[in-house]
Image (cartoon, rainbow, N blue to C red):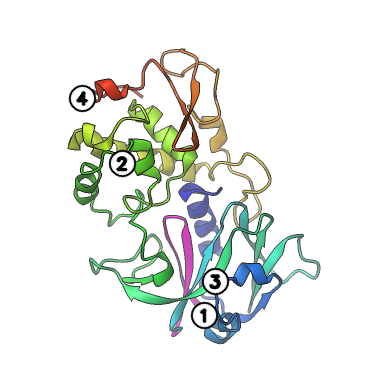
């Protein structure tokens, strides 16, 4: 499933190619892609003839802000969704194309093999803090569809102290907290494991056993890890994740924990192990990641 770095990589590609272009037509090829809309014709009615002014993101939600539109054009990629830009609308669509957005200079294709993703026309609501709603937007207007999730670690307006305070009030395992989009958004299984390896925190450690300083360090580490992933175009394990230009990302080469069961820890050479936590595969170093019994200490190091 694309996580924050992959969605941000796609957002950046879209921003380069479609800002200022006018939507001429929205063509729906798959009813499942618009299953959240009571009236799929809203996509055409709300957006045709309007120009794309912003390509914004909060967590794993992407949206286009179009001039004068009463709603935002929202895309959630689900497990396998892709947003591909073309200089001209292709005559032959790729397999699994669900929606085509025809522009006055090109097209955006929403392609989704596993069909868990969707597009939506969502009303805009004000952010509770009155600040810009996410990355890529100057507006304090957030799609209602994404209003239930918190800001993400790469959001310049994230209130770290408030996030840490909320985390410190729960006894849930720190990995579960990182995956819970109500605390911080955009983190999935890959980047939760990577964050906790870099921070030397055992995934099963209760959040309220960690000090505010340690919780802040975990969130900052998540931002550092995911920022590095964005710079390398995200993590591609197969052809399902590509950027807006159809290219794979290279962060898989930099993974230190996720998917490396049995391989040596890059810090201490101890074989990495896999455990199941909350039904999710969890990858960690049994030696240098702090155990839940020693939650008062976090080691230094890379």
Q: Which residue is mark 2?
A: 219
Residue beneath disc 4 = 296
Q: Is residue 60 above or below residue 283?
A: below
Distance between mark 3 and mark 4 Cα atoms:
45 Å
Nearest to viewer (mark 1 / mark 3): 3
> Which one is earlier in the sequence, the residue at label 3 or at label 2?
3
Q: Which mark sits nearer the N-terminus, 1 or 2?
A: 1
State the CA–CA distance, disc 1 to disc 2: 36 Å
Q: Nearer the viewer, mark 4 or mark 1?
A: 4
Label 4 residue SS: loop
Which residues fall within the magenta stretch? Answer: 51-68
Viewer-nearest residue: 87 or 81: 81
Mark 3–mark 2 distance (CA, rounded to whole Å) = 32 Å
Q: Which mark is residue 51?
A: 1
Q: Residue at x 44, y 37 (%)?
A: 278
Label 3 near label 1: C-beta < 8 Å? no
- Left or right, 200 with respect to 10, comes to left
Q: Which mark is residue 36?
A: 3
Q: Is residue 195 left or right of residue 111?
A: left
Ranked by sequence position, the earlier of labels 4 and 2 is 2
* Percent of width and height locating residue 92: 81, 67
Residue 128, which numbered label?
Answer: none
Which numbered disc flags the more N-terminal residue, 1 or 3?
A: 3
284 in the magenta segment: no
Residue 24, quarter of picture: bottom right
Rendered location of residue 113, percent (x, y): 69, 55
The answer to whether marks 3 and 2 mark residues whose Cβ atoms lie closer than 8 Å is no
Within-10-Å neighbours for mark 4: few <14, some 14–19, many 20+: few
Q: Image point 56% across, 48% down: which residue?
A: 1
């Amino acid at each position: 499933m694309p996580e924050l770095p992959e969605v941000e990589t796609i957002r950046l590609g879209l921003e380069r190619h479609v800002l200022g272009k006018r939507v001429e037509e929205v063509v729906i090829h798959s009813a499942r892609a618009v299953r959240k809309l009571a009236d799929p014709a809203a996509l055409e009615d709300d957006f045709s003839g309007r120009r794309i002014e912003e390509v914004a993101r909060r967590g794993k939600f992407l949206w286009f802000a179009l001039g004068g539109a009463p709603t935002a054009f929202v895309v959630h990629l689900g497990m396998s969704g892709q947003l591909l830009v073309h200089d001209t609308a292709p005559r032959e669509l790729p397999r699994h194309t669900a929606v085509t957005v025809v522009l006055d200079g090109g097209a955006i294709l929403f392609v989704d093999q596993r069909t868990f993703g969707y597009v939506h026309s969502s009303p805009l609501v004000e952010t509770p803090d009155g600040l810009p709603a996410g990355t890529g937007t100057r507006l304090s207007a957030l799609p209602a569809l994404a209003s239930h999730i918190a800001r993400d670690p790469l959001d310049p307006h994230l209130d770290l102290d408030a996030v840490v305070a909320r985390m410190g009030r729960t006894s849930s395992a720190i990995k579960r907290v990182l995956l819970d989009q109500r605390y911080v958004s955009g983190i999935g299984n890959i980047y939760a494991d990577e964050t906790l390896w870099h921070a030397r925190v055992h995934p099963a450690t209760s959040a309220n056993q960690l000090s505010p300083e340690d919780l802040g360090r975990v969130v900052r580490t998540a931002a550092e890890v995911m920022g590095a992933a964005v710079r390398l175009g995200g993590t591609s394990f197969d052809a399902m994740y590509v950027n807006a230009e159809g290219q794979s990302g290279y962060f898989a080469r930099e993974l230190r924990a996720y998917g490396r069961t049995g391989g040596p820890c890059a810090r201490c050479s101890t074989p990495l192990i896999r455990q199941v936590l909350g039904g999710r595969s969890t990858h960690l170093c049994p030696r240098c990641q702090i155990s839940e019994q020693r939650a008062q200490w976090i080691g230094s190091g890379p």
